[in-house]
Image (tube, grey):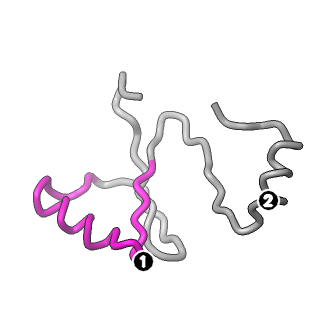
Amino acid sequence: MPQTDQSVIRGWWATYPNANVGVYTGDLFVLDVDRRHGGDATLQQLTAVYGDLPPTVTVRTGDGWHYYFRRPDGEH
């Protein structure tokens, strides 16, 4: 469950001012492909074996891409 207590969140920001923000996506999952960690090469390897990703909303990030997918019914 996502954290919503403002005092806890403020404490995290004070302790980790350069942290990335995680967003609760509900029935979506996000594939985060970061080039600096070899994500683009890994994605190419996976698609060579399993085929291309289905069409989806894609967002350019500072170092790669986020691919948004709806979670299949019954999957958690």
Above-or-below relation of 36 to 4: below
Q: Decide if residue 43 is on the left or right side of residue 10.
A: left
41 inside magenta stretch = yes
Mark 2 and mark 1 lie on one chain; the one further toward the N terminus is: 2
Residue 17 placement (x, y as % from top left): 77, 66
| Residue situated in front as seen by the camera: 3 or 30 | 3
> Label 1, on which residue?
36
The residue at which mark 2 appears reads as: 15
Which residue lies at the image location 36% right of the left edge and 22% below the top edge? 74
- Classify residue 18 by image quadrant: bottom right
Q: Is residue 39 found left or right of 30 in the rendered image?
A: left
Q: Horizontal and vertical percent for residue 1?
A: 63, 30
Amino acid type shown at disc 1: Arg
| Quadrant position of residue 42 | bottom left
Indicate the quadrant containing the C terminus: top left, top right, bottom left or bottom right.
top left
User: Which mark's residue is nearer the viewer, 2 or 1?
Assistant: 2
| Residue at the extreme left of the image, as rendered | 49
- Element assignment for label 1: helix
Disc 1 residue crowd, few under 14, some 14–19, many 20+, Cα 10 Å: few
Q: Residues within 10 Å of mark 2 (few under 14, many from 20)?
A: few
**Residue 14, percent from left and from top:** 84, 59
Q: Which label number is shown at residue 7? A: none
The residue segment tinted magenta is 30-54
Residue kind at label 2, given as amino acid type: Thr
Please report the residue visible at 18 percent of the width from the left and 60 percent of the height from the top.
Answer: 47
**Residue drawn at 42 percent across, 77 percent down:** 36
- Say which residue appears at 34% left-offset and 31% top-offset: 72
Q: Is residue 28 magenta?
A: no
